[in-house]
Image (cartoon, grey):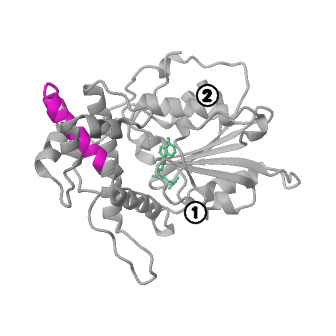
Amino acid sequence: MIRRGKSITGKPVGPNKTQQKTIKPSKTRKIIRRYHFLNQTKLKLLKLLSLDDANNLLYESLRSGNSHFREGSDLRHKEMNSIIETQLIKTNQHKEDKSLLYKLLGYVYYELTDSQGLANYQMASKMGQDSKRGGDSSKILIEWMKEIIPREDKRVMRALEIGSLSSRNKISTSGIFNPVVRIDLNNSNDAEGIIRQDFMRRPIPKEDSDKFDLISCSLVLNFVPTPIGRGEMCERFEQFLKRDEKGYVFIVLPLPCLANSRYMTSERFHSMMKCIGYKKLQYKEAKKVCYMLYQRAYDNTTTKRSPFTKKKQCRDGPGMNNFNIMLNKD
Ligand SMILES: C[S@@+](CC[C@H](N)C(=O)[O-])C[C@H]1O[C@@H](n2cnc3c(N)ncnc32)[C@H](O)[C@@H]1O
């Protein structure tokens, strides 16, 4: 799945006739793929070096305290550094060479935190929301919610949108949800009403009134680099959903994650969600993505957790990917 791509720190994308920045679909895909590659490589390097960056403080401390890391992060490359890029693809081959691993880590951190790279990544993700390229996935959510909620029910629902790129999407403008709390890991555009925040570190609300009726998680789970990390994200939803109501979770995934993976199918995903307390209300496949709506279900028919704590191959075939989601052993 990981492929070699071009630098995301390439030249800025110029204005078009409408003064809006655009990127061609092929470049959009490359930028996104590159970003995922860097994230995966960062995790591998941290593991090889037995480091933990849970508090996001590592960059500063390594920059001041490790000369190899600093050397890597100082390679302020306009063009990709081909030697380093090759070494990044084969990190395991260099596992004995700690100095090189630190240098690679410095390089990766710089690439990931470089503001031009991030801006391009954000723009590439936004381009994916362009109506010509799949559009705003929350349109489907709103259609479904309108079917579910009786007309006479005028209750306004609170929503948390994880991985939000715009405050003008249907989830924010339909009037069904108010407020819509929008968070994103990387968003630097606070003026648009998107809080820069990692959902996995968002404080758990104490009061039920601060919890949500709906969590939207569109094209975010596939962004999380590890199967266990994805499972943890799914399990965390529950702590943000209101207790008295039956909260909803809207999930969107790239279709190949469920339709072309050796380890995950739509049935397996629904069973995993059932196991952690949700019933499936809706499932729809489009050309490139699949949409799902779940609701909290406090029933007594528990599904065993153990099938989802292990890697299980469901099928195999040429060109299949290894996308997976796993639950922690309790
Ligand atoms: C591909 S974009 C999807 C954007 C949009 N929701 C959509 O459906 O097109 C994925 C976004 O999820 C964000 N993201 C990933 N993990 C996150 C986390 N733990 N907390 C908050 N945002 C996260 C990333 O920063 C990125 O902007």
**What's the amino acid at mark 1?**
Ala
Ligand 1 contact, mark 1 (Cβ < 8 Å): no
Q: In terms of sequence position, does the residue under pointer 2 or pointer 1 come before the other?
A: 1
**Residue 318 or residue 326, whichever sits in front:** 326
The dot on residue 274 is 2
Query: Residue 30: which numbered mark, if any?
Result: none
Give SS at disc 1: helix
Tell me where residue 322 sits by quadrant: top left
Residue 243's quadrant in the figure? Answer: top right
Residue 41 in sight here: no
Q: Identify the residue at the far bottom of this view.
A: 17
Q: In which quadrant of the rendered view does residue 259 lie?
A: top left
Q: Main secondary structure of the magenta part?
A: helix
User: Residue 73: percent from the left, percent from the top?
Assistant: 24, 46
**x and y percent of residue 226 in the render?**
39, 33
- Is 78 left, or right, of 296 in this rendering? left
- Residue toward you, 272 or 43: 43
Q: Is residue 4 left or right of residue 200?
A: left
Q: Nearer the viewer, residue 148 or 29?
A: 29
Q: Magenta region: which residues?
A: 92-110
Residue extending furthest right? 152
- Say what secondary structure mark 2 lies in: helix
Q: Are marks 2 and 1 in contact (CB under 8 Å)?
A: no
Residue 40 belongs to the span the image colors magenta: no
Residue at horizontal 49%, vertical 16%?
329
Q: Which residue is mark 1?
A: 191
Neighbours of disc 2 within 10 Å: few (<14), some (14-19), many (20+): many
Q: Residue at the location (46% across, 26% down)?
A: 326
Measuring 46% from the left and 20% from the top, which residue is drawn there? 309
**Amino acid type of the residue that numbered disc 2 sits on in the rendered structure:** Lys
